[in-house]
Image (cartoon, grey):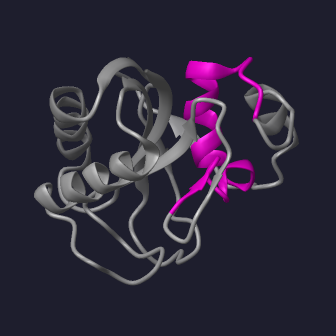
Amino acid sequence: MERVFLLLGSNLGDSRQTLSRAVQAIDQSIGNVVAQSPLYQSSAWGLESQPDFLNQAVLINTTLPAASLLDQIKELERQLGRTDTVHWGPRIIDIDILLYGEQIIQTDRLTVPHAQLTVRRFALQPLNDLAATMVHPVHRLTIRQLLDVCQDQGVVVRLAE
């Protein structure tokens, strides 16, 4: 059983509803949802001329190997209405594997820990809510420390529940 941290994001349609449906589907078909961060709103990253994103970190326990987990996530994204779009463009759902236990994985299809985790405040902030003292397996700093030194100046606002 692996403890896996996912980041969910949406900026098209009813994003709150989409994230809620994604969490339910993850719990039913991918792995037991152990914890969820609050929702956060942030400006788009990369391609900035698009609606703000809602993001949420989710901790799951799963028996799926990392590659199979990625396949299941991609299928779930399709079921929830995601289509191939512009890189970093608007999307109805985006699910990233941030951390897969303490493993370091580098393949053509998957990099874990997520390659951009440490430079994205919108990912670090919700992850910090769930795992502030967890040590990043590559950088050897806690998530809280990574958040403290993150140079991303994007505004990330915690939403009321």
Above or below residue 7? Residue 74 is: below
Quadrant in which residue 83 is drawn: bottom left
Give whichever of 105, 121 is nearer the camera.
105
Give whichever of 100, 26 is nearer the camera.
100
Above or below residue 99? Residue 27 is: above
Question: Residue 28: x and y, percent?
Answer: 15, 28
Q: How many marks?
A: 0
Left or right: 76 with respect to 10? left
Question: Residue 156: x and y, percent?
Answer: 59, 44
Q: Residue at x 31, y 67 (%)?
A: 91
Task: Determine if the magenta segment contains residue 118.
Answer: yes
Left or right: 53 with respect to 98? left
Q: Residue at x 81, y 38 (%)?
A: 146
Q: Which quadrant of the rendered structure holds the N terminus? A: top left
Region in magenta: 110-136
Q: Residue at x 66, y 58 (%)?
A: 116
Left or right: 136 with respect to 93? right
Quadrant in which residue 22 is drawn: top left
Question: Residue 152: x and y, percent?
Answer: 75, 55
Task: Determine if the magenta segment contains residue 132.
Answer: yes
Left or right: 108 with respect to 27? right
Q: Residue at x 51, y 64 (%)?
A: 44
Give whichever of 108, 151 is nearer the camera.
108
Above or below residue 48? Residue 68 is: above
Q: Which quadrant of the rendered structure holds the C terminus? A: top left
